[in-house]
Structures are given as structure tokens and as C-alpha cells.
Image (cartoon, coloured by chain):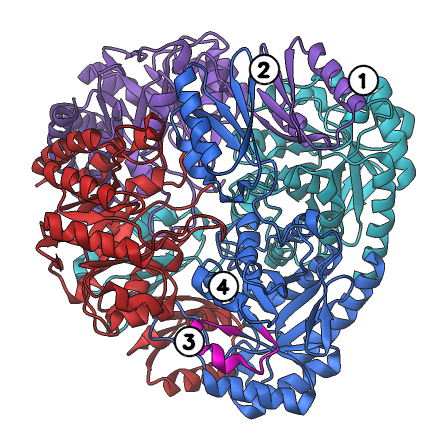
Chain colours: A red, B blue, C purple, D cyan
Amino acid sequence: MIAILKPGTTAQQTAHLLTWLKHMNLDVHVSEGKEFTILGLIGDTSRVDIELLSSLEIVESVRRVSEPFKQANRKFHPTDSIISCGNTKIGGGHFAMIAGPCSVESEEQIIEVATAVKASGAQILRGGAFKPRTSPYAFQGLKDEGIRLLLEAKKVTGMPIITEIMNVRSLDLFQEVDVIQVGARNMQNFDLLQELGKTNKPILLKRGLANTLQELLMSAEYIMSEGNEHIILCERGIRTYETYTRNTLDLSAIPVLHELSHLPVVIDPSHATGRASLVPSMALAATAAGADGIMVEVHNNPACALCDGGQSLTPVQFDSLCKQVQQVREVIR
Amino acid sequence: MIAILKPGTTAQQTAHLLTWLKHMNLDVHVSEGKEFTILGLIGDTSRVDIELLSSLEIVESVRRVSEPFKQANRKFHPTDSIISCGNTKIGGGHFAMIAGPCSVESEEQIIEVATAVKASGAQILRGGAFKPRTSPYAFQGLKDEGIRLLLEAKKVTGMPIITEIMNVRSLDLFQEVDVIQVGARNMQNFDLLQELGKTNKPILLKRGLANTLQELLMSAEYIMSEGNEHIILCERGIRTYETYTRNTLDLSAIPVLHELSHLPVVIDPSHATGRASLVPSMALAATAAGADGIMVEVHNNPACALCDGGQSLTPVQFDSLCKQVQQVREVIR
Amino acid sequence: MIAILKPGTTAQQTAHLLTWLKHMNLDVHVSEGKEFTILGLIGDTSRVDIELLSSLEIVESVRRVSEPFKQANRKFHPTDSIISCGNTKIGGGHFAMIAGPCSVESEEQIIEVATAVKASGAQILRGGAFKPRTSPYAFQGLKDEGIRLLLEAKKVTGMPIITEIMNVRSLDLFQEVDVIQVGARNMQNFDLLQELGKTNKPILLKRGLANTLQELLMSAEYIMSEGNEHIILCERGIRTYETYTRNTLDLSAIPVLHELSHLPVVIDPSHATGRASLVPSMALAATAAGADGIMVEVHNNPACALCDGGQSLTPVQFDSLCKQVQQVREVIR
Amino acid sequence: MIAILKPGTTAQQTAHLLTWLKHMNLDVHVSEGKEFTILGLIGDTSRVDIELLSSLEIVESVRRVSEPFKQANRKFHPTDSIISCGNTKIGGGHFAMIAGPCSVESEEQIIEVATAVKASGAQILRGGAFKPRTSPYAFQGLKDEGIRLLLEAKKVTGMPIITEIMNVRSLDLFQEVDVIQVGARNMQNFDLLQELGKTNKPILLKRGLANTLQELLMSAEYIMSEGNEHIILCERGIRTYETYTRNTLDLSAIPVLHELSHLPVVIDPSHATGRASLVPSMALAATAAGADGIMVEVHNNPACALCDGGQSLTPVQFDSLCKQVQQVREVIR
């Protein structure tokens, strides 16, 4: 970490600051230039409060030289992490299609969708049991019954399942769930992250609506610092001023996260765009950019003409997408 | 709620949609124009999933005519809510200065700051015991010991106290806390909101970094729908591309929230700007815009010259600010 | 266009509004519901000021049913536009690699890069002669000399050239330029757009840093409404709070613009990301998402080890990218 | 300017970089630490391309110590600039109310509004003659006729006038205009800025929708570097994801710009909020935050009940606002 002191800082002020920094067990390398003094802080700077340091009156600016995340950092773990999710793997060359309905609605529905997406090549079944909703009056999911139905579908199809957790107190219900999802709104629910860090379940961690990629990695670090290294990162769109799409899918997250971290990166084009017509091209783009998996919503509703549209693909559309994703995978290998 | 159907929608598709809507106990008023058909949905539309409805292939667009929040809505509660916080009040003409250190550090510190800010006219003491931090390696606050020290300061000064809760499981520790703060990162931690709705404590609910004002009101609605109507809304800066300030303080939140809701609105200029030099002008601006309270960080550190700067005011700066805030209050009354 | 009137609007107010609307040669279809009155405006609503109408006290909300752009609209021009750029084409299945240095620096440089990128398969040569710079003290390009050197490179290689115009008064210099680029900062320089609309040159129109896709199409409409239909749209990254990349490349712009318009869409991953290491994956992603062309920066500087890095690819990296882009093209055809 | 080199940079690479930097007439102060090497660049660093330097493979990060703007910089001009606008002044304790209609519509209208706002205490008359519009089909203003009518109103009332310029070629029409406005969309129309720098007219420069405060100051620098120092900065709302207000008014711009620059700062709450009901509280807030002037839209339309609402105040509302602004001014003096 580098701190640049303002011109005019007195020797006494500098001495005060050095004392304070050395209290934190940091070595400080002082370099006095003509116009400014530069401090190089050496040691475990991950505990230094960069905002506090930056805001001191005598400090011009502070710059981390090393990233604040360690266990998620590719520098200290150069090879790709491979995360085992039941009988399948994600990362390090293993690619997964994750598919299923937005919400689990009935046993018939979830088994029908699971069977269809498995036939098309999906490796993992997704489905919402606990649904975070902006309104307290909206449908919040089937909850524990939803998880029971997912486990039925797992039994029938053999597919590992992924579903979202919304609070620490329902953790017991997730015993047989293969991958636990942390939603965008909970990306900085640090208490939840720490509890999940004490399990050894794979965690799919979604980027918050307005969080930077570094913050996403710091949230992964929260889980990893408690001992659980099975993290899958997920980009699902960020909030911008554009209104045609629900959010703006930031596909540069894929190469950036791969540069900074060894953790696999999955893309969710369904929530990001909010429109089924945009999902296939964004899924192919994510694949071409090197994503380790794609998570898409697929529904079944042959009888209900209304339900065409929305952000979910039909099983037929999903089948066609799987074939193209496979072909793009072959090009970039 | 108004739904506009696309040109070319068939009679059968319209009939399907009407059946689905009537299933939700809605009356539907159909108006067929030359080019488009408009459906007026009448009844309790707060349960309608507007995103799902909008995304149907036959639907051009959907528009709420009534807001999705009810208990927080000024339409159904025209007079300002007045929230009692210990021996003081906020809202409906009652204005509060809330002040104190960022973190509770020691008994001496919190009592000294509390005594100073009370002397300047602060009505409520703030201080962080549980601190949400981006990094798992950063100082997370004194936790239960921090709350104990705040209660000491309350005993000594008689000031009601406000401090942040980070998870449902620590709720027991907040028995004697006067106002419970929900931080920006937890604004959509719906599980926490619902639990707080079951208490009868005043809740200061901070707007999330990238949340709309309507989403803030929907989160207030989560608390209120469980029975707790003692909500204070707080704007503390939103995330934009501007880098000079930590966040961008959105002061138009004050008149907008006052138009839409009866709940009081408090402004936190310290976190929003991240720089003490900007706090006084933003606090005065918030007062002039009609805020019901200002929450600012004040530290004491006579011995530590380093600590000047940062986002905290000194007691002397705070004293001077209080006088000007009072004068601006008199102008806009 | 649909206007919804607020409950409580008087008959006289409604009559006033109808008179005003009919003055604009609009037919108005009035539908009175139980709670609200809906006006359907029929005719040429592109002249209606939607912001003014929305802000009237009696108006709850206004919603366009038809898009405000006409000549750029796919509804009125269902087949893809194919834009001829010298001896090459973009759009309607024609894909172009556009490559060259950020700035034209010397005759030797531009001819060397042009020869290299042509050999790798680039169809169009790019190079900056007039450079928009945030600072008045920064290098602003070789200007007319830069254009002369581009024309030299065109003569030697036979490649059509594209370069940016910054003001109307230098239009004469662009007589032999094949494609004129309008930069992001000038996307809403309406005077410049109208002047370019009077030429018959192909125009590559870049999306502004904080402009919506609809605003981009409205700027295309400015050019087209003056008679020039040869427009290529270009996404080059939007401004968000993320700081790791220079901007956030919005690849959903590709399918969205293709849905809304018949105009071809080119992606510029070099400016969007600001880092050469991210350019290949973003270029492949853009191709997979259906882009009609990719515009990348390529430099030559065998002698200058410093210049590795930056946002430009080396000729070797570009050659390898061209091969992969070609393979992805074959998959999605 | 400080450049931090990555660990592992070779002596040869460093030597190459030093040669390049010295070519730019910079002195370089090298400080080699245990883990990293720091270069302090001394001299006229405003010409250094910080993006290029940052992107070099051997460079970890670059940080300006001095701001890139000079003539706009308070460091080199500690006292407030006072800008003369006809017979009135802005800055350095001089405060101006600038008022008038959005668009000039007729002689009767502009004279009536001018007379009314002057009576309430406005010092400068605003009115749009050239109107930048997103759509080519929308009303673009009365253009030269609009300027003629403004000059009539100036003659009748004695008020100096301000109106927007949209392109260099219409500069001749602005001979008798007292203050020339550069709109948000043209904030980085560098060619226009440079031409205005060759005049000696006061320029009111609006911040772009998605521009940082530093970029605003760099655009002021464009004008000043050509010799015209009569600049008034104007904040008029930035683009965010919030949809209730048209834009988000960033009032922290006032103290930030006052810290960084000696130029006066005017706030436009009408365009920022898009709603008349929010204008008075935002105008008072801006005043309390230390703005040097407020620019608001005022219309007259006694006969047209429809036109209530919108973003314009009535003369009566404006009169009441002027009184309160005056009182707030007295508090903060």
C-alpha cells in the first residue's frame, strides 16, 4: 500500500502518522521527494482502513498495490479452482449448463422441466423455493415445500440442484441441496456469508446490482475466510440508466474475474436482460467470453399461450441454445 | 393498473389473459381502441407481478396507477407520522440532530462525545457497535460490548441511542436501544425487515446504494406490513460514476419522499460525502430542503492531530453547524 | 401514445387538454374507467413533447405505444440495411473487421499497421486524425495531416478508411474518407448530425457514454431525417460505477438494436475495456451475440517494449483474434 | 504525478520508461522500495496521457498529485472569480436569480415573464431560442427570432439575458447576448468550447449528464486556455437509475467545485428534477449549500389551466421562492 502525503505536511504530523501505522504492525518505507513524501506500507495491509487513511487531512491519496482479497486471489492460487456440484464440476475447463424454472410451482412442473433440460444437456437443475421480492405482498415462493419438490426432481433425474437461501435460520433445510445460491440483494449480507463459510457446500454468489467486481471478490473472501473454498461467482446484470433491458449484463466480468481470481464464473442472462428474446445471444456471448457456466430460466407450459414471452425459454429454445453453446465452446477451447 | 396490449393480439389471447387476471380477484375494464386494447385492472393490484405481466408477448406495457405501497403511502395517511425515539420526536415538524462517533471505541470516548454533542443541541446519540465492512479482515466493531457502552452513555447523558443491527440473531441485544438502524446493504434483507416488523422499536431504514426511492418505500412496507409503523427513512448517498465524493447525496429524496409518504426523512451527509469539509454545506442544504433530521459523525480526539480530516466533524465544528441548522429551520418554517 | 389522467380531473380540464391535443392534428380516443380516464392519441405523435405532457398536473403518466424513431425503425423497414463502405459491406450478413492504430502518427506507422491488419483479414482501416481529448493540453491528433496519411495508406493497401469528425467546419477534409465516425461525446451534437445527414457518406455513430439505446436511435434518426440512410451504430461502453474496466461494454445492445432497427451494429471493445487483455474475449462475445462488425485498435511497435499493454493489440494478437472471430461467425450463422 | 511500477519490472524496462518520460521534459524522481518502484514525475504533467501511462504492462497505477486543470484551479487563483453579466455580477459573494421561460414563444410572453420575474428580484433573464431536442421532429425553438425577442425583453426591462448556443456557426447571433449558455450535451463539444474561448463573453457551462466534476473543470479549462476567463459552472442533474426525478441533482457539486476552483457555481433545479413541486426545496437547498446563483424556469399562462404543472414555476411561486432564498442567504453569510 502506498500513501502519498500532501505538500506542506510537517515532520511532526508525519511522525504521528508513522507511529499510528507501526502500531498496526506495518513496516513503513519513507521516500521524500521534492514536492511530496511517499510512504510504502509493508506487511498485512488488508486490515488497514483505506477510506480512513485516505481521508486524513495530510494524506493526498492512498493506493493499494496488492489486492485486498487473498484466498480468492489468483496470485496466490494460480490454477483454476474446480468446484464439485454433486456429480458434476464447474471451472478449470469444466462447463455447466444450469437450467430450470424461475419458481418451483408443483411436482409435475419441476419434474417435467428437469427431465426436459436434462435431455437437452443441462447438468444442474435450478429452481426458486425462497424468492426475494421487492414487495411484501408478492408471492414469496413455496419455501420448504419448494425445496422438497426440488429434491424429488433430483431423485427422479439424478441432477444436482441449486436454490437460493435468504436467511441463516433456514440453513437446515439446505442439507441435501447441492449448491446454495446467494442472491444479488444478499451479496453483502456479511452475517449470512460467514455462516455459509462454516459449511462445506458449494456457494453460487451473485454480484449485487451495484457492486464492483472487487466487492464481489471481497464477499467471496468472507465465505472463504471461514473455511469454505467452494465458491462460484455469478454475474447477473448491474443497474444502469438503460431501461430497455431490466439490467445491463456486464460480460467483461468474465475475463476480469478470471484475471483476478481462480474461482469459476457463471453468467445468468435471464435475470440480466428480463427478456427471453435476448437470452440466447447473451448466453452465446458469455460462452465465447470464456464463462464456466450459464444459468438460464426454462419453463414448460404447452397449454398456456400467455406464458410465452417473459424471461424464460421454452424447452425447445433451450435445446437449440445448448447445441450452439456447445459449438462455441469448441471454438474457444 | 393499466395494461396495454400489442396490436395484433387475438381475441383468444386476450380471453386467456382476462381469465388469468380474474383468477387474481381483479376486475378488468377492457377498452378497445383503433390500434390497441387497454385493460384497466381494478382491485388489489399490489399482488400482481408487474415484471411478469410486462414480459408477456402480447403485452406492450404495464403501468401502475396506484403506488405498490400502502401503509407507507401518504394517500392513505395524509398527516405526517411523528416517530417517538425515547424522549424525543422526529417528523411532523419535530426535527432531530443525531450525532456521535462512527464506531464506539471506549467508554471514555462515547461519553465524551455524547456530552459534547448534547451540549451543542443533539437530541439522539449515534455510534456503531456492529460495523458492516467490505473486507472480512477489517475491524467489525465492539459488538455487544459496543452496545453496553452506548447504554452507559445513555445513562450518563439521558440521550436516546441509535445503532445498527446486522442480523436477526442479535436482536436480543437491542432491547434497550431506542432506535434500530438498518444499513444500506441490508435495505433489501427482507427477512431482517420482517423480524423488525414484529418489534415495536423505531427503525431508521437507510436507502441502499443503488435503490430507487420506491424500493426504499417498499422496504418500509415490509416492516409496516408486520405491524411496526415506527419507520424513519434515511438517504445516505447513492452510487454513481462521480469519484470525488464517496457517494452522491440525493437531496431530492426529501421532497419526493414527503410527497409519496407520511414517514419522516433523515439525511446522513457524513457517509454520503466521505469528507468532513463537505458535511456542513450538505447538512444545511438538507435542512433547507425540509429534512426531518440530520445524522452526522462527530469524533473527539484532542490529542490526535492525525484524526482531523476524515468524514467526522470535531465537536467545535458540530456546535457551529447546529447553530446554522437552527437558523435555516426558522427560515423554512 | 397513451395518456392516463389522474383521478379527480374535471371535465373542463379534460376538455382543455383535448383541445390542445387536437391542435396538434391528433385524433384522441377517450376511454373513461371507474377510477381513471385514458386517452389514446392517434396520428403523428412523434412531434408530441412527452416530457411536457407527462408533467401536466392532471396527467398521471404517458406511454408511447409506437417508438419515436421512424426511418431507423425495423417495423417500417423489416430487412437488414447493408451499408457499403468503399469496396466492403456491413450488415445483412456482411461482417467487417475494422482495425488500425488509435492515432495516426506517421506515414510509416499507418502503412505498416494497415498492411499487417489487411493480411490478417481486416476489411476497413481505422485511425484517429482528430482526437477528442478531455484536456486542452493533451495531443489532439495530426488533424488534416492525419487524414492525408490515412489516404496514403488507402492508396497503398486498397482498404477503405474510417476516421472521426469533430466539427462541421472540417467536413471538406473528409471528401475521400469512406466512413465518417461520430464519437461518443458528439452523439447528441445535433447540428453536426444534421450536416452529416446532408452528405451521402456512411456514418459510424457511437453511443454516448450515458445514453440509452433509444437515444442512440434518435440520433441516427437526426441523420436519416436529412436524407442520409447509411448509418452504422456502434456500442463502445457506457459509464457505470465499475472502475476495473474503463467503461462497461453493453453487449445486449446488439440483440436490442437488431430488434428495434434495421441498421448494422459494430462493437468497439478497445475503448470499452481500456485493456488489451480483455479485448479478445469481448470481441468474440460480440461476434457470438451477432455483431455486424468489430472495431479494434492495433499498433505496431516492435522496437518499443513499453508500448506493450495499453488497449491496443499487437498485429500477432490481432491475427489470432481474426481466426477465432471467423470460427465463431460460422457457429452462429 | 506518481507512477508505481509492478514488482518484477526489469532494469531495462524501467530505463526505457525513464527515457520516454524525459522526452516529455519531465524530471523523474525514482524511489526503489522492497516490493515496488515509485516514480515521481515533476514538471508540466498536464500533457501526460494518464490513461496510456496507466495501461503500460509494467505500470501498476498512476496517480496525479496535482489536478490536470490550471486556470480553473483555486490553488493558483485563491480568491473567488466574480463574473460580470451585463449590469449584474455572479460569484465572490454576488448571488443571482436567473429566471425565465423554458422556450421563448412570443414577444408578449417573454416580456410578460421578464417583467414579472424582475419584479420578484430576478437579476438575469433566461429563455431558450435554440433548443437541443432528442428527436429531430420536436420543436427546436424560434432560433434567431427567439434571440431577437430576448433582446426586446432586455430593452424593455433592462435585464441581461442568457441563452444557449448549439453550434459555432451561429455565434454572430449572440453579439448582444450577455451570457452564452453551453448545454449539458455540448459540455465536451471541444471545438465549440475553443471558439467560445476566443470571445470575451461570460459562458455558463452546464455539467454533462454523465460527467464528473473534474471533467466539467477540464471543459472550463478548454475555454480558459483560449483566453476567456469568464466562466460560470452549472450543475443541472446527472443521470442515475432513479426514475421519479428526471435526473439526480448533485448538490455536493457546490462545495466540491468551490474547493477545487475559483469559478462561481449556479444550480438549475428545474431541469434536474423535471417537476415544479420539487423546485423550491431544491433551490433553497442549493442556496444553503452556498450556490452563487439559481436558474429556474418560470412561465406565464393565466389563460391556460393545463400548463400548471410541468417543471416551470408560476410567477407567484417564483416570487415566494425569491423571498425564502433571500432569507437563507442571510443565514449562511
Q: Is residue C84 above or below residue A29?
A: above
What range of the chain is rendered magenta? B164-179
Q: Residues within 10 Å of mark 4 (few under 14, many from 20)?
A: many
Q: Residues within 10 Å of mark 3 (few under 14, many from 20)?
A: few
Query: Which circle's residue, 4 or 3, is located before the other in the chain?
Result: 3
Q: Chain of mark 4?
A: B
Mark 1 and mark 4, same subunit? no
Distance Cα–Cα, label 4 vs label 2: 45 Å
Q: Is residue C272 above or below residue A171?
A: above
Helix, strand or loop under label 2: helix
Q: Quadrant of the N terminus of chain B?
A: top right
Mark 4 and mark 3, same subunit? yes
Distance Cα–Cα, label 2 vs label 3: 57 Å
Does residue D166 appear in this view? no
Q: Which mark is residue D106?
A: 1
| Residue drawn at (18%, 17%) of the image | C157
* Labels 2 and 3 touching (C-beta < 8 A): no
Helix, strand or loop under label 3: helix
